[in-house]
Amino acid sequence: MRDEPGFGPTTPGPVHDANPGPARLRGAAGDPVPHDSAAKHVSGEAVYTDDIPELPGTLHAYVLQSPRAHARILRLDVSAARRAPGVHAVLTAGDVPGAVDIGPVFPGDPVLAPELVEYVGQAVAAIAAETPGQARAAAALIEAEYEDLPAILTVDEALEAGSYVGPGLTMRLGESAAALAAAPRRLSGSFAMGGQDHFYLEGQIAYALPREDGDMLVHSSTQHPSEVQHLIAKVLGRPDAHVTVEVRRMGGGFGGKETQPALIACIAALLADATGRPVKYRMDRDDDMVMTGKRHDFQVRYEVGFDEEGRIQGIEMDLAARCGMSPDLSNAVVDRAMFHADNAYFLANATVTGLRCKTNTVSNTAFRGFGGPQGMVAIEYVVDEIARALGRDPLDVRRANLYGPGRDLTHYHQPVEDGPLLAALMDDLEASCAYRERRRAIDAFNAAHRVLKKGLALTPVKFGISFTATHMNQAGALVHLYQDGSIQLNHGGTEMGQGVHTKVAQLVATEFGVGLDRVRIMATSTGKVPNTSPTAASSGTDLNGAAALRAAREIRNRMTLFLAEHFAEPAESVAFRDGIVAVGGRTLAFAEACHLAYVNRIHLSAAGYYRTPKIWWDRTEARGRPFYYFACGAAATEVLVDTLTGEYRFLRADLLHDCGTSVNPAIDLGQVEGGYVQGLGWLSFEELWWDAHGRLRTHAPSTYKIPTGRDVPADFRVRLVANQPNREDVVHRSKAVGEPPLMLAISGYLALKDAVAAVGGHRFPVHLDAPATPERVLMACEAVRALGAAGPWAGP
Amino acid sequence: MDQRLAELRDTAPAVPDRIPISLVVNGVEKRMEVAAWTTLLDLLRNTLDLPGTKKGCDHGQCGACTVLVDGRRINSCLTLAVMKDGCEVTTIEGLATGDVLHPMQQAFVDHDAYQCGYCTPGQICSAVGLISEGQARTREEIRDLMSGNICRCGAYPNIIAAIEGVLGGTAPAQAKEDPA
């Protein structure tokens, strides 16, 4: 582990076991081996889509964007652009040979706008030219005339107009209205949280290569190759089998490459099809930020009733998301926000409603956590306000509300068995981060300082693992064992830095009892594994690892039966371990056994398939078991705020996260740290800002502040929970880790709220929308000061 | 539109289509003719077949394109190639000696100082420059002076630890107990 609890600042040491010793094969499941591309990452040899050598004749794409939020296209004249130097094709909606709509689940996302534009940045026309500069210059020659229509830009406007991308949904447990009426104390309020741009360092990109007979090979930076394949086939008007989509690695995804790459890949493929030449569409960074969807911003309204301990008796919550101009994945995102509106707390009488607001802004989409973080921020904000109203430490109110024996049913009727684990995590962290002592020290500091105020918060995370669309919880793999004993591994998961390829390869190597160096990791291709689900919902290793293990086990079983028969030994005597195969008293080198099986005509290739058991979800009744299990964690963050400017620094963070029995603790540790940093960015500095015309004005890192090394708490202590195998039968008894740690950062946001509360001696409510930018923190401090000047607060 | 562009073209001062320059890139002298507006980044990636240097934002705001020019780090996307005529350029491809990684590259591997790897070449070049510029002495200074290199995966604690390790000359590879 990175550090022992309770001791001073940590200098993280190297994270890998440098000398595993002669007895162990490097890279078995559970080993903290480096990422499979580590050496290539540091030498610059890792090939991303933009690094693939371009074929001669490659053209470059550029897209003309809508300058209007909502308008009818009256006239679109591309004739001058078509004549421009270097231009080979200019396409509008009418030139699309197949279907124009590329909505991933529901229709609503035209690849090129047909008659109507519905957000600033929407693709109107696509150009292929010999250089990117020529394509861009040609776009400037397109003449477009628009007739503006009324535009709805915000959640409030959408709620007022009843503008939705889909029907609302309500989840209910108990009788919230009666419980609210009977509760000794009540609070109600509303607040807002902003969205987030993915800012994957590698922007959206696709490289389309026309093949014979109208086939198309597309290198796409995508988390969802199967969907990109399907939608390309759809716009080209061809069967899926004619299109192959491949991705070796992405320079980050974070959910932004789940549905969004389809637009880029479809445009590249359409232009390649129209010109018969390879076409690369590499989005400029500003275009990427304007044209592609982001994390949903939410408005939250709540009414909560509670007792003097802060225990929630009844709660009603409305979660309204800005979905943008189309449904995209918003239905599922808002569902997941609702699923997480309990976080770790038992809400005996709850009514949670999710609203999907349609606005004339870019269609918001998946982003690490997929609505879960927004639901969790909602309930954590409410719990914090309860604590403020009672004058109690928010940690005590959190503890009072935690799931536990007899208090173990969610508002969607899934039982929760993790109450004791959550309590144990909070106990551990409370002690190891010295919460009570630091609380007292912070109180003393705040009493002694008029301008500088410190805040501290400790929050739990309980995150549901599984796609809530049950059918997506399936995966495939294709494993080849060659007669020289080398292994080729194909599976449906995509690599975006999270280490899924490394972890799945470790599982396969362990199954064959060989070193990791025998396993060759292949690019993800729809030609190898069909009908895959996106690498999303933290499910990459759970699903693809299980599918790859089944394929490996199938081959191993065939070899076992053959070797037993061949040497006339019982099958139970055959063992694969330490790079050898033992058969009775004999020992064969692994390669020797493979060759022997081959010459005896044993099939050494297998496809594996896996689907998650136990899960179901009845959306009409809003009840079921949408999640196979929960991943849990807890975090404490301390912040120092200058209450005269609103500027702040995060001083210290203590993270404790449950990965079950980790397949690779080094990689999982990275996910925990990185998730926290990304979550902290979302809730603190990262502010998306649209003007009154619906134009995003924060479309580059100059105006959109992404956390840097100096924004991370200087004292940063991260631990994985030890000896906590997943009770469900997940590969290696591990737990998914991609998304859950992002929500550890809610402690940072609430630490800011705590510091603001200190301005009024913790006697007043604190309204603080997210992101809690220095500007918002300053305004919140001023509001608390004004309350203080008005006299003591009587409470709710 | 066409006419206005034509007028602008006619009145603009004459710029030669191609300008001859010479650069020493990763120790090898390269002579070539480039358009005046070619960035050093595009020259490296598109002309010199050195795609290790990445284009992240193309605005000098993310640091993914950091390379060393005469030992100092710069954003190659904000630098025109012609401005560096006669200079020595080191990219990520030029740091290793044969198969032996540069100590900073090795430290990044040892500390897991990346996830997706896209910012890594820029981080490493920036870190090498930081040390050769002699600016950073403490962790706090490393945090400040590396703040021009964004890592969206958030591997900062490990990036900073890797740089600290090289700066302090500590042996990077030390056995670590099993976390489980």
Image (cartoon, coloured by chain):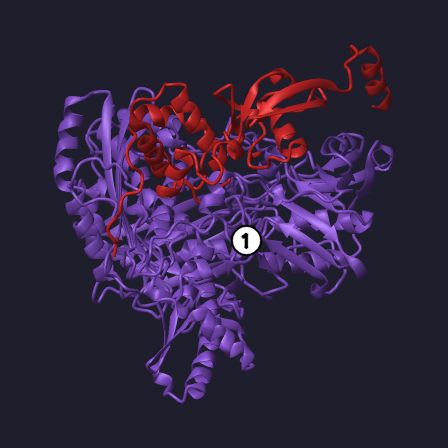
Could one spot residue A765 in this view of the protein?
A: no
Q: Is residue A380 above or below residue A623?
A: above
Give the camera-side residue of B26 and A377: B26
Chain A painted colour: purple
Q: Residues within 10 Å of mark 1 (few under 14, many from 20)?
A: many
- Percent across and percent down for residue A740 are 37, 52
Look at the picture and state if A485 lies above or below A245: below
| Horizontal relation, residue A427 to residue B42: left or right | left
Q: Nearer the viewer, residue A260 or A525?
A: A525
Q: Is residue A721 visible?
A: yes
Quadrant of the image occupied by residue A531: bottom right
- Residue at image mark 1: A223
Q: Nearer the viewer, residue A277 or B94?
A: B94
Chain identifier matching the red colour in the rendered picture: B
Q: Residue at x 38, y 29 (%)?
A: A776
Q: Looking at this view, is B173 or A677 the one in front? A: B173
Q: Quadrant of the C terminus of chain A?
A: top left
Give the left or right position of residue A47, taking residue A173 as reference. right
Q: Position of residue A453 (x, y in %)?
A: 23, 26
Residue A511: percent from left, percent from top: 40, 69
At horizontal 56% and vertical 81% (from top left) the residue drawn is: A601
Instruction: Identify which amino acid the numbered label 1 is placed on.
Output: Gln
Residue at image point 17% right, 42% down:
A392
